[in-house]
Amino acid sequence: MGYRVAVVGATGAVGREILKTLAERRFPADEVVALASGRSAGAEISFGEKKILTVRNLETFDFTGWDIGLFSPGAAVSAIHAPRAAAAGCVVIDNTSQFRMDPDIPLIVPEVNPHHLGRFARRNIIANPNCSTIQMVVALKPLHDKFKIKRVVVSTYQSVSGAGKEAMDELFMHTKSSYVHESSAPQEFTKEIAFNCIPHIDKFMDDGSTKEEWKMMAETKKILDPDIDVFATCVRVPVFIGHGEAVHMEFANPITASEARNILRDAPGVTVMDQREDGGYATPLDCVGEDAVFVSRIRKDPTVENGLAFWCVSDNLRKGAALNAVQIAETLIAQGLLAKI
């Protein structure tokens, strides 16, 4: 018998990607239900090539008898309904920021820290990390295991899909308007995003960092190693899908670019695309619809002792959200941690 899976926030960009990923990976589900707010109830949404699901109302849904809840409805909604689902016996895998730093809730990237999954039973909830953190730690993990990372400085180039469908629509409309010499005030961003870069994602904190930058630091410590220092600058760029990151590392032990390249070629979830020639690197367009984190531009950083740098890109809706959540569920099954109700 397969599992009963509830996809919460099914009408959003991540929710739709979760449904697509479940179908593509042939997740062992006997039944899948699409849940969203009351205003979306009754709408129809695709699941796989032939099946159509009718969206049901999250507010009145009874999670009793459901095995897995894949949540991506926004933090405020997850705060209400994820504990409700968990109390009904449904294992919640939450894509929002609501539970990531809760010490009783594991924050999981299956290629990096699957051994942390055993702690989920305390609350019956597992947190999915921030999209920018996921792709970075997938690439850092195999290097850290062998050479021990002391410090990371990262600059991100994050696509607008990380801010939702409305942000994607705004990029489209503002780009279109610029060609006909029209202008409109930004709604989803603090400045116009078309043909621009905005060094501001999430709220500003007291030290001048943004919450997105803090997330990359705090989540990396929780997932990978609390002794790693992380400093991030997060930038929104006029790209629809796919995050890029320029990552600079300082190691405790000597490392060469060749050693790093060979290790990353064998690392789970990583694809190395690193030819030192025109076009011999990955860009956001190359990673759309792909599962892997693509690593390019691997090179020695001579400005610090044992320094190394690389460029990485990943589909933020897929590995940065939907795929990672589904992989967590698959890992629970593989480890024998997801009992059938």
Image (cartoon, rainbow, N blue to C red):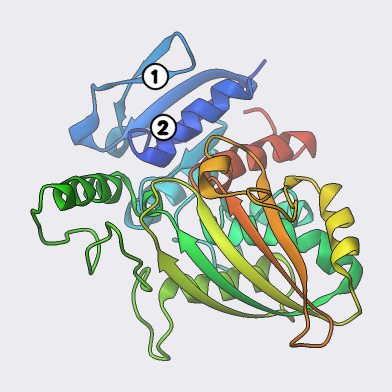
In the image: residue 239, left or right of residue 281: left
- Contact, mark 1 vs mark 2 (Cβ under 8 Å): yes
Identify which residue is drawn at 63% across, 38% down: 291
Q: Is residue 106 visible?
A: no
Residue 46 marker: 1
The quadrant of the image that shows the N terminus is top right
Residue 111 vs 227, above or below: the answer is above
Q: Which of the 4 image quadrants contains residue 192? A: bottom left
Which residue occupies the foreground of this view, 107 or 296?
296
Which residue occupies the foreground of this view, 76 or 238?
238
Mark 2: which secondary structure? helix
Label 1 amino acid? Ser
Label 2 amino acid? Arg
Relative image position of residue 49 (x, y in whole percent): 47, 12
Residue 26 marker: none
In the image: residue 145, left or right of residue 90: right
Q: Residue furthest front?
A: 278
Relative image position of residue 296 (x, y in whole percent): 69, 56
Tally of numbered discs: 2
The quadrant of the image that shows the C terminus is top right
Identify which residue is drawn at 74% across, 52% down: 274
Residue 157 vs 71, above or below: the answer is below
Relative image position of residue 87 (x, y in whole percent): 50, 46
The residue to which callout 2 is attached is: 16
Crowding around mark 1 (Cα neighbors within 10 Å: few <14, some 14 to 19, many 20+) is: some
Mark 1: which secondary structure? strand
